[in-house]
Image (spheres, grey):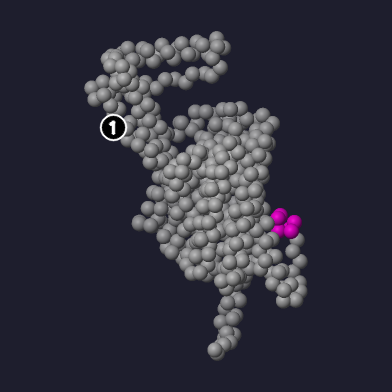
Amino acid sequence: MAGGGIGVSYSLKDLPKLLPGLILCIVLGWMALQWDASMGELRKGFRESQAILKPHLELGKPIAPYEDYVKNKEDSYKGALTLYQLGIEKVKPSKPYILEKDDYERLSVDKEPAFMFRFAERTVQFQLTYVALLLLGGMLIRNTVGIPKIFQAGTIAARPIIKPGIILLGAYYMWSDVLRVGAIGLVLVVAFVMGTQILISIWGRKSNVDDGLNGVMGSGVGVCGVSAAVAVAPVVNAKPRDFFYAIGTILLFGTLCLFTFPYIGKALGMEEPVFGAWVGTAILNTAQLVAAATWYGHDALLTANIINIVRVGFIPICVLWAIWYFVVRPARQAGIETGQKVSALEVIKEKFPIFVLGFFAMVTLNQLGVFSPVHKDMLGRDLLRIFFAIGFAGVGLNIAFEDLKKAGGKAFVIGFSAATLKAVLGAIAVIAIGSEAFRVK
Amino acid sequence: MIIRPIPPEKETKMAEINKELEAKAKATFSAERKEDIVVLVMAAIVVVLVLVGAIDTKFYSSLFFK
């Protein structure tokens, strides 16, 4: 996961240090969600205005007086409610959106939706949702006025708050979805993610890049950003400089993807499940991947989440690969007995990201019928957004240009090229496979 | 080409840095494990609150101004 808890430990004694930054992220997250809620209401006004104008503009019908408009809306709601109460309609009708008198009268005169309604509609076209606001806004704050020291630890600790959201999203899946999409995800992960790590390892060796740098770059760019780099570092004796180079490359690539992929996806006409599969394969860390998928749409997030779960499950395998490639294999070639006994089970036990088990527990509870449709929406949409908003605030506030500048050298070229190749080939593969294979029903 | 040996004090310093890094990597991973436990507990609390009805459908919309 992006930066995971680098430099921050979650313990009660650290709480006073974390609290100011966490509160800042909660406040920013709330402001962004408030923006979304307000824009959502205004967009209803836009759609309602259009519905009122349509018969007038297309058929030349006069716009009815406000009182008649309100009465019509209320009558049609009452009618739909009666049908529901009689059991003829199965879905309970929601209360109608009724324009305010001032807005209605202005609409009658201007013959176009009010400016605020049009503005709200434009925000959808430019995908200016809470995700974009938190990431762009956070990045802007971090790189202009900066974050006072008192807030820094807390903003880092806020990033993993995305994870409870990922767990709650499990309420939407049945095991059949997880296994079906997960099986395709597994093929993609093996082909692209492990493929990238192997490519970087071999390419780096051929280009005489340090084993330490090569190892952390391969695992970081290939599998799961900073977590994988941290897990592999002791195996390959990475130096602090290697960390900065690898993390700089991962952050730079992830940041570029985050802000460009949603637009590339739209330009290529990717459906949401296809986009979800693409970002799940191509973006290097969980926070950025979840942000890009959420930005694109809920169905994109549902697919991306499964692929990501498969991908982070590969961290232990990535560590085993690094042990074999950088320690066991060269020692054998040199005829040296390393004396290191590596237990695969031990590595898996130590490095497996256990939050994934929470996601599986949620899928199982859903399979057992514990969650009603209302529960699912509350957990997988509303509460998820609260966790995501706090986490995205932390992500945005921690995108520092000076960190991105740390990427450099030959390893950067190799890492960046391999990540770009993975993204391009990944896009071709997911488009060829098609949306139905990735759709979570 | 003359290969200069690394001065012993520099070698010791590098070894210290590597040790420090290894300790930091280990500590970071254990922090991530702790972090995972914290997020599991957070998610479990939320699920229980939703299932017992302490968080209802109006909760989310009640957080924002209309």
Which residue corresponds to the image point at 28% horizontal and 26% vertical from the top-left?
A: A112
Tell which of A38 and A117 is nearer to you: A117
Q: Which chain carries label 1?
A: A
Q: Residues within 10 Å of mark 1 (few under 14, many from 20)?
A: few
Name the chief secondary structure element in magenta: helix
State the quadrant of the C terminus of chain A: top right
Circle count:
1
The image quarter in which residue A132 lies: top left
From the viewer's perspective, tell me whether residue A317 is left or right of residue A143: right
Residue A421: percent from left, percent from top: 53, 56
Please give the range of residues in magenta: A344-349
Q: What residue type is labelled 1?
A: Phe
Q: Residue furthest left?
A: A109
Query: Is residue A242 magenta-colored?
Result: no
The image quarter in which residue A216 lies: bottom right
Residue A196: percent from left, percent from top: 59, 58
Q: Which residue lies furthest to the front in this view?
A: A432
Whether residue A142 is situated above or below residue B8 in the rendered picture: above
Q: Is mark 1 on a helix, strand or loop?
A: helix
Whether residue B1 is situated above or below residue A34 in the rendered picture: below
Which residue in the protein does label 1 denote? A115
Q: Can residue A9 be seen in this view?
A: no
Whether residue A333 is situated above or below residue A379 in the rendered picture: below
Which residue corresponds to the image point at 31% horizontal and 17% vertical from the top-left?
A: A59
Residue A374: percent from left, percent from top: 56, 27
